[in-house]
Amino acid sequence: MAAYLLGQVNIKDPTLWQQYVKAVGESLTPYKAKVLLRGQWHKQLVGSSQFEQSVVIEFGSGEQLESWFHSPTYQSLVPLRDKAAEVHISSYSN
C-alpha cells in the first residue's frame, strides 16, 4: 500500500533550503520514492493555512517511508532543514 509524506514549509533561508532540497532528492533514490508535488501556496479555499509551500512524496509503503525518515542519511539533514525552514511533516496511507 502506497504511503505519502506531506511537508508544509515556511522558508527562513532560501540558499540553505535549496541545499536541503537537493540532498533530500538524492536521499530518496534508494527508496524508489518520487516527489509528486512541490509547490507554492496559491489560494486558501477552506479554513486557514500558515505555510507558503508544500511537498508530497510517494513511497511504496509506510515501512519504506519510515525507513527513509529514520535513516542516518535523512537524519543527518535535519539540522540543515531546521536552519533553512519551519517544516511540519506528516505521513498518510491510502
Image (cartoon, rainbow, N blue to C red):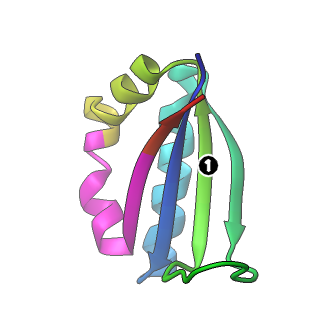
Between 77 and 45, the one lying in front of the other is: 45
For image coordinates 39% across by 66% down, the residue present is: 87
Q: Is residue 48 above or below residue 3?
A: below
Q: Which residues are magenta?
A: 75-90
Q: Is residue 76 above or below residue 60?
A: below
Image quadrant where one finds the N terminus: top right
Residue 31, position as x, y percentages in the image: 52, 21
For image coordinates 60% across by 28% down, the residue present is: 94
Between 31 and 51, the one lying in front of the other is: 51
Question: Relative to 73, is 52 on the left or the right?
Answer: right
Q: Hey, what amino acid is under mark 1?
A: Val
Magenta span has 13?
no
Question: Relative to 81, is 38 on the left or the right?
Answer: right
- Give the quadrant of residue 57: top right
Between 4 and 94, the one lying in front of the other is: 94
Residue to which mark 1 is pinned: 56
- Give the quadrant of residue 53: bottom right
Residue 33, position as x, y percentages in the image: 60, 29
Tag 1 secondary structure: strand
Residue 58, position as x, y percentages in the image: 62, 34
Count of labels in the image: 1
For image coordinates 41% across by 83% down, the residue present is: 12
Between 60 and 71, the one lying in front of the other is: 60
Crowdedness near tag 1: few (<14), some (14–19) or many (≥20) residues, C-alpha within 10 Å = some
For image coordinates 52% across by 51% down, the residue present is: 6
